[in-house]
C-alpha cells in the first residue's frame, strides 16, 4: 500500500509541476523515477521513451503506466496514471469554465509567452540527457544521422521511423 501511495504522489508531482507536456516533462520524469526513487534504470527509462513513441497516448501517461505496472502491477499502473493526470484534470475542469472570461487577458498572454522559451529549454535538456545514454558508439550515431535526415527531408510518420531504426538496430547489433 505504501508503494502505491508513493507512486501516486511521485507522478502527482510530475503532473503538477511539469509544463508543456511530452518532451518537456522528460527531465521531471527522469529525475523522479530514475534519480530520486531508483525505480528504473536510465536504460529502462530510454526504453520507455521508445515504447511511448510507438504506443498511443502522451509520454507522461505511458511512462506512468509502465513504471506503475513494473513496480506494483495493475494497481500500480492505475495509481501512477491517476497521479500524473490528476492536477491537469482539475485545472482543465476549472479553467474551461473561466477561459472565456480571461482569454483576452494581457497578464495570461504574457505569462504564456514567458513560459514558451522554458519549454524549449526543457526539451533540449531532455534531448541532451538521453543523448548521453543513447549515442554509445559510431553505429548509434549512424542510426541517429540516417533517421534525422529521413525526418527532416521527407514526410515520414515518426512511428515508421522508429520501426526502421529498430530494424537497422537489429542489423547493426546482432
Image: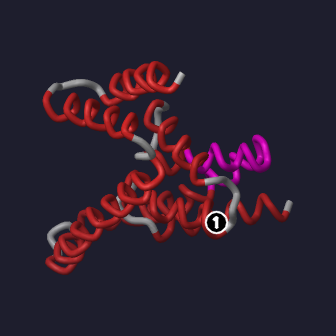
Residue occupying image coordinates x 58% and y 54%: 42
Residue occupying image coordinates x 45% and y 63%: 27
Neighbourhood count class around disc 1 (C-alpha, 10 Å): few under 14, some 14–19, many 20 upward: many
Q: Residue 93 appears in which quarter of the rendering?
A: bottom left
Residue toward you, 99 or 157:
157
Magenta segment's dominant SS is: helix
Instruction: Measuring from the top left, give residue 86's x and y in whole percent.
Output: 56, 60
**Is residue 65 covered in magenta?**
yes
Residue 66 vertical placement versus 161 (above, below): below
Label 1: state its secondary structure.
helix
Residue occupying image coordinates x 41% and y 46%: 135
Instruction: Measuring from the top left, give residue 89's x and y in whole percent.
Output: 50, 57
Q: Which residues are magenta?
A: 63-82
**Is residue 26 covered in magenta?**
no
Q: How many marks?
A: 1
Instruction: Measuring from the top left, give residue 116's x and y in whole percent.
Output: 23, 66
Instruction: Measuring from the top left, give residue 60's x and y in whole percent.
Output: 50, 51
Tell whether 54 sits left or right of 82: left
- Which residue, given by chain and number where applicable, does mark 1 sit on? 10
Quadrant of the snapshot with the C terminus: top right
Tell whether 98 sits left or right of 87: left
Residue toward you, 163 or 109:
163
Q: Residue 32 appears in which quarter of the rendering?
A: bottom right
Quadrant of the snapshot with the N terminus: bottom right
Amino acid at each position: 500500500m505504501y508503494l502505491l501511495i508513493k507512486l501516486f504522489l511521485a507522478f502527482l508531482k510530475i503532473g503538477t509541476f511539469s509544463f508543456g507536456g511530452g518532451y518537456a516533462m522528460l527531465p521531471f520524469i527522469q529525475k523522479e523515477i530514475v534519480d530520486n526513487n531508483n525505480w528504473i534504470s536510465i536504460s529502462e527509462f530510454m526504453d520507455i521513451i521508445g515504447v511511448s513513441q510507438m504506443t498511443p497516448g502522451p509520454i507522461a501517461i505511458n511512462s506512468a503506466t509502465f513504471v506503475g505496472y513494473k513496480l506494483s502491477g495493475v494497481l500500480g499502473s492505475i495509481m501512477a496514471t491517476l497521479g500524473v493526470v490528476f492536477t491537469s484534470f482539475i485545472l482543465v475542469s476549472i479553467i474551461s469554465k473561466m477561459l472565456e472570461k480571461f482569454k483576452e487577458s494581457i497578464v495570461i498572454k504574457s505569462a504564456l509567452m514567458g513560459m514558451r522559451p522554458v519549454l524549449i529549454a526543457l526539451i533540449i535538456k531532455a534531448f541532451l540527457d538521453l543523448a548521453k545514454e543513447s549515442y554509445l558508439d559510431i553505429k548509434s550515431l549512424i542510426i541517429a544521422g540516417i533517421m534525422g535526415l529521413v525526418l527532416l527531408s521527407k514526410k515520414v510518420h515518426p512511428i515508421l521511423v522508429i520501426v526502421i531504426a529498430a530494424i537497422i538496430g537489429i542489423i547493426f547489433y546482432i
